[in-house]
Image: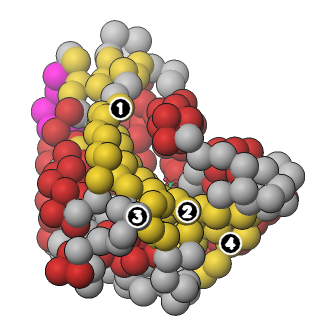
Amino acid sequence: MVAKDYPIKTSKQEVARLRMQSDLFRVDAASMLDRIGVGLGWRCLDLCCGVGGITDLLSRRVGTEGTVTGADVDSAKLAVARDWAAANGLDNVRFEQTDAFATGFPETSFDLVHSRFALSVIPNGTEILDHMVTLVRPGGIVFVEEANVQTMECVPPDPVWDRALALMVDTFAKIGADVHLGPKLYGMFRAKGLTELRVRPCLHALRAGDPMMMHLPSTVEGMREAILSMDMLTAVELEHMVERLRKHLSKPDTVTISYSMVQVVGRVPEDGLPQSSVC
Ligand SMILES: C[S@@+](CC[C@H](N)C(=O)[O-])C[C@H]1O[C@@H](n2cnc3c(N)ncnc32)[C@H](O)[C@@H]1O
């Protein structure tokens, strides 16, 4: 089972792309978990966890008294996640196949609900936030980390970078996703009545040899089926674009700035959220 309309195909390359992305932003996620104060005994959910997401970081913090649930709709990715968790001794982590818009988990059953790089790439993904807040106990934490591609830059510039970036952004827009979502989450958290808000952008510079340097061509390749089905490019044009872009990104002088991962954290008030903000 895979997500309907989710535009990036599950494959070995996609598993590798998600691992690279996790590695790049690992320190950022870990440091926010420490600021939040995630500790022993917490019950945590990582929604749309893909091949593992941040379940390893949560697992170490909650210890044997705590629990971590990783949830995703894609059974193939969850199979990879389960093998990875077993290989890393993450005994307090379980993985569940479910739809992030309506998980079926009991309301108010988690101390922390997290999601990363999902609300911005899934059609109508912000509606997932409506569901997330219902899963958090009064006094608990909602933590979302989402992309903003506004920061992406390549120096020296090359038209193929600009074309590939526009293609990625347009393809996501056509399916109803918003890859500029990151900073907009702050207002959404406020509107929901979440308190003690934190917001923090995380950004990285990349150069030849860094695994994430090829993130843009890998993402565009992963979206091949969606791009071709929407007649955005022909297969040959796409192949040429990816080849030229990889060549430019392999040059020792080329440096790129990543998309930012904007972290937004809020607390559900002890007396619950205003009813008008809960869907
Ligand atoms: C870009 S990946 C991010 C994975 C993970 N959060 C991470 O940071 O490594 C987005 C994930 O959302 C999942 N997804 C898409 N639509 C979904 C839905 N409706 N319910 C649950 N998961 C979904 C995909 O299967 C994919 O694993």
Residue at which label 2 appears: 111
CA–CA distance between discs 1 and 4? 27 Å
> Who comes first in sequence, dot 4 or dot 2?
4
Point out the frontmost of discs 1 and 2.
Answer: 2
Q: Residues within 10 Å of mark 4 (few under 14, many from 20)?
A: many
Q: Position of residue 216 (x, y in %)?
A: 34, 43
Q: Quadrant of residue 52?
A: bottom right
In the image, is 180 to the left or to the right of 129?
left
Q: Residues within 10 Å of mark 1 (few under 14, many from 20)?
A: some
Residue at which label 4 appears: 95
In the image, is 174 to the left or to the right of 119?
left
Image: magenta residue range: 157-162
> Who comes first in sequence, dot 3 or dot 4?
4
For numbered disc 4, what is the local secondary structure? Answer: strand
Do residues under tags 1 and 2 come within 8 Å of each other at their CB atoms?
no
**Magenta-colored segment: predominant secondary structure:** helix
Give the numbered dot on residue 271: none
Is residue 153 magenta-colored? no
* Residue at x-position 56% and y-position 76%: 109
The amino acid at mark 4 is Phe
> Does mark 1 have its CB less than 8 Å from ligand 1?
no
For numbered disc 1, what is the local secondary structure? Answer: strand
> Does mark 3 have its CB less than 8 Å from ligand 1?
no
The amino acid at mark 1 is Cys
CA–CA distance between discs 3 and 1? 30 Å
Query: Which is more toward the observer, 191 or 260?
Result: 191
Residue at which label 1 appears: 202
For numbered disc 3, what is the local secondary structure? Answer: loop
CA–CA distance between discs 3 and 4? 29 Å
Is residue 160 magenta-colored? yes
Give the numbered dot on residue 270: 3
